[in-house]
Amino acid sequence: MVKLRLKRCGRKQRVVYRIVAIDVRSRREGRDLRKVGFYDPIKNQTYLNVPAILYFLEKGAQPTGTVHDILRNAGVFTELRLNQTQFT
């Protein structure tokens, strides 16, 4: 199973997270399948590769709680619903 989760990067006291698609059995810093965005909690910035995120969500990837909140605030789930209703 694939999850969309945060991967810690940056230096001490200056953390930045990558949003990655990763196998659920891998550890937090393990090898990811694909980098799909990043999140900077200090500057409150996000960059999302929306087509890649939609691809993984359509294939059944589950976002973690924090990633779910980030994606919801960015409006990714509304795009996912629009794509699903478009093809049905």
Image (tube, grey):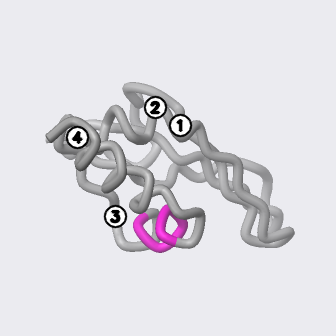
Q: Amino acid at mark 3?
A: Thr
- Residue under pointer 1: 36
At horizontal 71% and vertical 56% (from top left) the residue drawn is 46
Spatial CA distance of label 2 from label 1 is: 6 Å
By secondary structure, the bulk of the magenta-drawn segment is best described as helix
- Magenta range: 68-72
User: As rendered, which of 25 and 70 lies closer to the eye?
Assistant: 70
Q: Amino acid at mark 1?
A: Val
Q: Earlier in the sequence, mark 4 or mark 1?
A: 4
Spatial CA distance of label 4 from label 2 is: 13 Å
Q: Amino acid at mark 4?
A: Val
At horizontal 49% and vertical 62% (from top left) the residue drawn is 71
* Disc 2 element: helix
- Residue under pointer 4: 2
Q: Earlier in the sequence, mark 2 or mark 3?
A: 2
Q: Amino acid at mark 2?
A: Ala
**In the image, residue 67 above or below residue 11:** below
Q: Residue 59 at what x, y percent from top left?
A: 20, 35
User: As rendered, which of 61 and 13 lies closer to the eye?
Assistant: 61
- Residue under pointer 3: 64
- Residue under pointer 2: 52
The reply to whether dot 2 and dot 1 touch (C-beta < 8 Å) is yes
